[in-house]
Amino acid sequence: MLTEQTVQAVLQEIKDPFLHKTLEETNGILEIKVKEEKNHVSVKVAIAKTGTGEQLQLQQQIVNELKKAGADSVGIRFADLPEEELEKHRGSGQGGSGDLLSPTSKTTFIAIASGKGGVGKSTVSVNMAVSLARLGKKVGLVDADIYGFSVPDMMGITKRPVVRGEKIIPVERYGVKVISMGFFVEDNAPVIWRGPMLGKMLTNFFQDVEWGDLDYLLLDLPPGTGDVALDVHTMLPSSKEIIVTTPHPTAAFVAARAGAMALSTEHEIIGVVENMSYYESKKTGEKEYVFGQGGGEKLADELRTDLLGQVPLRQPDWDEHDFAPSVYGEDHQIGQIYLEMAKRVVNKLS
């Protein structure tokens, strides 16, 4: 006959999927009831985060284990662990810096998104990451544009990540720790994976990479509102978001869709970056508004956020001995613009 003590013994060995500690360690077993006449078990369990795919997997695991122990039917209710319980586990085990998706993680996610391709979203991602590092922040950058990865080339990264134990060690350049699909495919090979495989790869980027303690993890999202972008939005416990557009009104209109997607997934939009705002002649100093005017301001107003900055068209200074074709130097005019934007981001988030 199944008893409450038997059920307790089964449950206390099962691990919280986010804290990676047993339900006994997290005080997550809230209630156990056994109806002997029907051989039915009813339990209430508290975990770090409810309403997720991990909860569904945990539910199935509990059902299977209790049926193995002799239950004919199982009923499960879930609750969120109280904040004071979560505090006990912050910074310890994989619930700390080892698992960025854990609700105990203190890393701030900043997703860089755009409504369409070709607006310089990856350039903004790279230079915002480098600028935050120049401000003394601990920064990571995930090239989440799975099909159109470009970050390693833009930053002049030629090394590949190494594996230490069961963890991938990201490549570091300009003080930024970087991981990208580009590290794991042959040069210029097409990525032909389907959605579920890509989702698993993104999960690996968060959970299987040794990021260490990060202040900010930036994500260069794919353009638009497709499956990969949606996966990232739903995967993150919470995230801030920066929307990139050009000054053209149509580009701003399309970018508004990415902003609407962020809001629908409860991500906070912290600003808009208007890229390719104008071209300034070196000879005359005259500004030419090649792609029109006003798109960034219009988009910021529509999304009820701030225009973080306007970035003009200008090539970075190339150094053949330290080649990074898309990174602006700290003393470069546009490098200074990115530094000011990074300061605004830090002020907003502090």
Image (tube, helix red, strand yellow):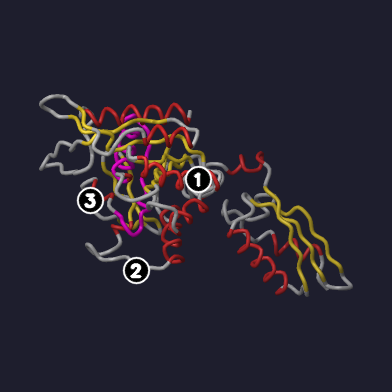
**Eye-nearest disc, 2 or 3:** 2
Residue 45 spot, x, y in % from top left: 71, 55
Give the distance between the C-alpha atoms of the residues marked 1 and 3, in whole angstroms. 30 Å
Look at discs 1 and 2 and give the one toward the viewer. 1
Label ID, residue 192 = 2
Q: Which residue is under mark 1?
A: 260
Mark 2 element type:
loop
Mark 2 or mark 1, which is nearer the start of the sequence? 2
Q: Earlier in the sequence, mark 1 or mark 3?
A: 3
Inspect the image, locate mark 2, and give the three-letter code of the amino acid beneath it. Ile
Residue occupying the far top of the picture: 285
In the depicted view, which residue is nearer to us: 79 or 39? 79
Q: Secondary structure at mark 3?
A: helix
Quadrant in the rendering for residue 185: bottom left
Name the residue: 39% across, 46% down. 114
Q: Quadrant of residue 310?
A: top left
Q: Which residue is mark 3?
A: 153
